[in-house]
Image (spheres, grey):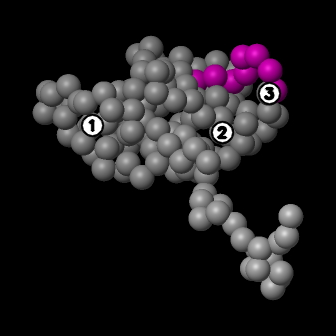
Amino acid sequence: MPCPSACAKGRHVLPSSYGRSYRPDVSDKPPYYQAVAAVLDALANGRTPDRATVRDAVRTTLSVLAAKSPGRSVEVRVPPYGAVQCVGGPRHTRGTPPNVVEMDPVTWLELAIGRTGWAAAVTAGRVAASGVRADLSSLLPL
């Protein structure tokens, strides 16, 4: 099969999607920062936020956390919307990781913006944190 004329001249011919994620809805950093404000505004005014907006807000703030503290020693779970691994240290490869933090979406968003403190959320039972590295107080608010 002959090489395209661009290859023959030393230039590579690549599809226009090359260099972008093959699953941008999962892999790229979500551009939904306005979703965080919309959810918090709805909660502050006694309204129930739209499920898709809550999802976008949670995924956005989780990606900010992962970028702020890269690593794989702690898994932060906000079911049903997402989970990330963060914090440097020993990483796990199979099964349930030794350091897990789990909470509901509203608690996560309140922690992420500083509306609720880490210690208060843990004491109130709104956050389940297990493991030596599972204290995210130094990383929050984002």
Alpha-carbon span between mark 3 and mark 1: 33 Å
Magenta segment: does it hold 80? no
Residue 130 percent coordinates (x, y):
64, 18
User: Is most of the magenta stretch helix, strand or loop?
Assistant: loop
Question: In the image, what residue type sits under mark 3?
Answer: His
Q: Residue furthest front?
A: 1
* Disc nearest the viewer among 2 and 1: 1
- Using residue 72 as the reference point, say whether residue 63 is left or right of it: left
Q: Mark 1 is on which residue type?
A: Val
Task: Report which quarter residue 126 is drawn in.
Answer: top left
Q: Amino acid at mark 2?
A: Cys
Instruction: Report the disc number at residue 92.
Output: 3
As measured in the structure, the alpha-carbon distance from the residue carrying label 2 to the one carrying label 3 is: 11 Å
Q: CA distance from mark 2 to mark 1?
A: 24 Å
Task: Residue at 31%, 36% (x, y): give it.
Answer: 53
Part of the protein shown in magenta:
93-101
Q: At x 80% / y 33%, what residue is drawn?
A: 91
Q: Secondary structure at mark 2?
A: strand
Query: Where is the N terminus found, in terms of image quarters?
Result: bottom right
Q: Is residue 119 visible?
A: no
In x, y percent, where is residue 104?
A: 42, 21
Quickly name the residue at label 1.
39
Image-quadrant location for residue 125 = top left
- Tell me: residue 122, above or below residue 109: above
96 falls in the magenta region: yes
Left or right: 26 in relation to 99: left
> Could you tell me residue 86's position as x and y percent?
65, 39
Residue at 83% from the left image edge and 81% from the top image edge = 8
Q: Residues within 10 Å of mark 2 (few under 14, many from 20)?
A: many
Q: Residues within 10 Å of mark 3 (few under 14, many from 20)?
A: some
Whether the residues at callouts 2 and 3 have beta carbons within 8 Å, the answer is no
- The residue pinned by badge 2 equals 86
